[in-house]
Image (cartoon, grey):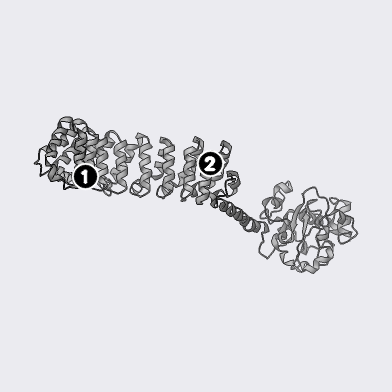
Amino acid sequence: MMNPQKMDHNNCDGDEMKTFTEAVVDTRTFSSCPIYDNGNNFLLKEGLDDNFKDDEKKCLINGIGDKDNHIERDNPGYMNQPQKDDLGMFGVNNLCGQYFPYPMPWIYNPFFNPYLMNSAAMMGGCMAEFGLNYNMETFLPGMAPRTPSQHQINNTLFGNNFYDQKNFPDVNSSLLDMFSLRSQMPTIDINKNLSTMDISKSQERICTKLLTQLKEGKGNELNLDDIKDHIETFATDQYGSRFIQSKYEVAGKDEKNAVFISLLPYVHKLSQDVFGNYIIQNLFSSGNEFQKSQLLDILSENILELTLNQYGCRVLQKALEAGDADDASLIYNGIKKDFLRCMTDLHGNHVVQKIIYKISSEYHEEIVNTLEEASNFYPIISLALHQYACRVIQMMIEKFNGSNKDYIMDKLQRHWKSLFIHEFGNYVAQKAFIYGTSVDQQYILISIRDDMLRFSRNKYASNVIEVCLENGNPDQVDFLVRKVFEEAFYKLLYPMIEDQYGNYVIQKMIDKANPSLRKKLITLIKPMQNQLMKHSFYKNVLLKCSNAH
């Protein structure tokens, strides 16, 4: 583009002037934007062509600083605009000899609608230090506030590719490049400052006021619509979370949909929040299939993180409870690379249990293969004795079938006695008896009978014996009860009766034995009443004997 500073417009020929005029004015586009040299003379006086209206020429050349010009009376902001002769007082004429484009009296221009602007926003804030405080209207988009975006130069405003034709580097700087005027001062975005400071503080005050009402028990008149702009803050507050949950339960369909949409941007954050997670759980419980699918889509990118999180794991459990096998497979795929890690995690094991309970059986083999591949580091018996993984093993025993269950049971078969007396393993043994095959059950019963006294007086193993008596068939129950008759009274039955754990096993035998064995057992116990009365636990056994008749 030709530089207007170095062009002698009085000596140039018609073609040069035409080129200059097109470069700076671009026909009618900037007909209302006069340009002055350092002598306050209108630079394009002799270069004006027929694209300018006669009244514009007269105004621009002769009447720009004339207070009697009738156009000033039609311009609402005219009195606040600096006049031609006043420009020097601002030091504009000393800006390194650069030309300063400035909109003067209001002239009709069909290319632009007027925009309200103020001194602080002009030229990206470069006039903020002039000490002015005025508002006015301008037809020049580049002079308008630089935010929001619709105030900036774009093809919609120009109706063409003006800045592309002139090879300007970008749309926002096109006017400044055209006039060779570049601000050396930092941009002051007043609108942005107002948005992030004043508006946010105002919203914060409103939110605080509403929460205070709830905490003071004065929020009965509030509804979900009142807090929609503060939904995130309310959801992470103890009282706010309860308010949302209670109102959501009784809300209508449209109101629920509105709340659901307003919560979507915060689903991941709220899922890991001490109060917010309850709201997301409610969305899974009461949402329709499409809404639950939306929630899972949002959470699917962070399944592992949520699985290992104290609150996120609860959300996933609720999602699994409310979902189907496909939902379970989606969550499984999010953790399968860290399956063992999740199994042995305080929070993750709960999610894995729900997955195994809900997922399609076609995935069972894949899970077993994962366990087998990790068996050198995590053998099945180690997982069965693990505080958290033992729960997952129990669920596998319950839900797996065929060869997949056989794999688990075979790995445990040689370790029943160790499992009986273990604080976590005993639960695995209990599940194994309840859901195992008859062969599996027989191995467990034989292991118990081999050391009945020891196991009956053990805190954990005694529970296993009671479960076997409770869930076994008549033959299996008889198999255990007959053991007490095979040993001398003082070697087995008496020590069991006087023990804090063993006496419960005897009571369960009396309950579950067939009539013949029950009578025989009571006959052995009652004659020893005088000797046994000194033991507090015997009273319970005696009471059970009395109730059995």
| Residue 286 horizontal/vertical position (percent) | 49, 38
- Secondary element at image label 2: helix
Q: Would residue 198 be found to the left or right of residue 47 on screen?
A: left
- Badge 2: few (under 14), some or many (20 or more) residues near its Cα, within 10 Å? many
| Position of the C terminus by quadrant | top left
| Position of the N terminus by quadrant | bottom right
Residue at the location (11% across, 39% down)?
Answer: 527
Q: Nearer the viewer, residue 176 or 545?
A: 545
- Badge 1: few (under 14), some or many (20 or more) residues near its Cα, within 10 Å? many
Residue at the location (24% across, 43% down)?
Answer: 463
Examine the rendered structure and indicate whether residue 267 appears above or below residue 15: above
The CA span between labels 1 and 2 is 48 Å
Examine the rendered structure and indicate whether residue 15 appears above or below residue 364: below
Single out the residue that lies furthest toward the right. 68
Q: Which of the numbered marks, if any, corresponds to residue 279?
A: none
- Secondary element at image label 1: helix
Q: Are marks 1 and 2 in contact (CB under 8 Å)?
A: no
| Residue 110 horizontal/vertical position (percent) | 80, 47
Examine the rendered structure and indicate whether residue 3 appears above or below residue 159: below
Q: Would residue 402 be found to the left or right of residue 112 on screen?
A: left
Q: Nearer the viewer, residue 417 or 191?
A: 417
| Residue 99 horizontal/vertical position (percent) | 77, 63
Q: Is residue 509 visible?
A: no
Instruction: Say what amino acid the circle numbered 1 marks.
Output: Ala
Mark 2, residue position:
248
Mark 1, residue position:
461
Q: Is residue 462 visible?
A: yes
Q: Nearer the viewer, residue 272 or 124?
A: 272
| Residue 61 horizontal/vertical position (percent) | 87, 59
